[in-house]
Amino acid sequence: MSHPGRLVRRPARVGLASLTTAAALLAVALAQPASADVAPSAAAPVPAAADGGQPSAVSVLSDAWNRPWTISFLPDNRSALVTERHTYRVFHLGVDGAKKQIGTVPNTVAASQTPGVTATGGLLGVAPSPTWNGTTDKHVFFVHTTAGETRVARMNYDGSTLSGYTTVLGGIQRGGDHNGGKIAFGPDGYLYVATGDALQRDLPQNRNSLNGKILRITKTGAPAPGNPFGTRVYSYGHRNPQGLAWDRKGRLWSTEIGGSKHDELNLITPGANYGWPTCEGPCTVAGLTNSKQTWAPAEGTPSQIAIVRNVIYVSTLRGQRLWRVPIDGDTEQVGTKTAFYPSTYGRLRAIAKVPGSDELWLGTSDRGTNRDKILRVTIK
């Protein structure tokens, strides 16, 4: 069954002031959060800077991008790989802003195969092997849509160019823009893959389906040892999860684009059922796991997340802002959520913490051909 409710949630892009003008106003306009409210999880409020400060400055690291989808740092911690959704290109981006195209991902098809649905897939997540060095380990993993499915693929990157192509995991259904797409190696060395429901509401609750799940697999695509059901499924009941990040205790957090009522921030535990389509946002149904934070679609549509000093930062698409959500110490609760930069840079998607630095790289999206930016956000 299709679920068209969310497909109409992409409004026309709000007109944007140039980044030059925005920079001139930065000291006044961006120094303060836009709004705040208390998490619906009934967690006790914690001080806004209990663990890790807040965004204090923004500059342009790199420009002339076309819908950057994911930023993923290489093990050298000095450079990252960046994917572009609809050009299928992959770039190497240094901490100095130097940008170089290293190749494209073959077999990628963005156009939707669902009749009457205009939303698209494309080249989505990228995750270098944790032991990548360009010689003995050249493996880089991608999530992308083909003509008939969403797929996890592997290519070789020697530090200069991409080559080769191997399907690691196929058979994930694609549908509209409900394809999930984030991929990341966890602290345990296994590969986590967020998949969407492909516009089919029955798939997230079907544990035999790869859709509407967070998967945990080996580098060859096999179920990772210790998975809760002995399959590739790590958690289920998801609608369209796109953010994955681990906190200082090694716990996995994920953002999820919901239906017409609530978007979610979830703390992921193995075998848990996150409720879609029975629940969206707060849920009292026995056996279903409640979200830790929610957003109304107009201020949310969360894409990806990064964690800096025990604070979760959430990029949003329709909401066109960066959310700050502090974790309450080492508990499973979060404190007050605060918004930064509303409508200043437009839709925001790709986000990553810079290793060894209290800094985020944050990508704009859908500004037009060669008009997207990757911003450097300093946390103080």
Image (cartoon, helix red, strand yellow):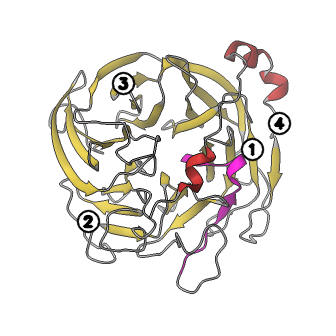
Label whose residue precedes the other's in the sequence (3 or 2): 3
Element type at mark 3: strand
Q: Which residue is mark 3?
A: 92
How dense is the environment of label 1, judged by Cα within 10 Å: few (below 14), some, or many (20 and up)?
many
| Callout 2 amino acid | Ala
Residue 54 appears left or right of 131: right
Label whose residue precedes the other's in the sequence (4 or 3): 4
Residue 202, above or below 339? below
Q: Residue furthest right?
A: 28
| Callout 3 amino acid | His
Q: Which residue is mark 2?
A: 224
Element type at mark 2: loop
| Callout 4 amino acid | Gln
Q: CA distance from mark 4 to mark 3?
A: 33 Å
Element type at mark 4: loop
**In the image, is residue 332 part of the stretch drawn in magenta?**
no
Residue at 30% across, 45% down: 130
Q: Which residue is mark 1?
A: 339
Residue at 34% across, 74% down: 207
Q: Quadrant of residue 105?
A: top left
Q: Which residue is mark 4?
A: 32
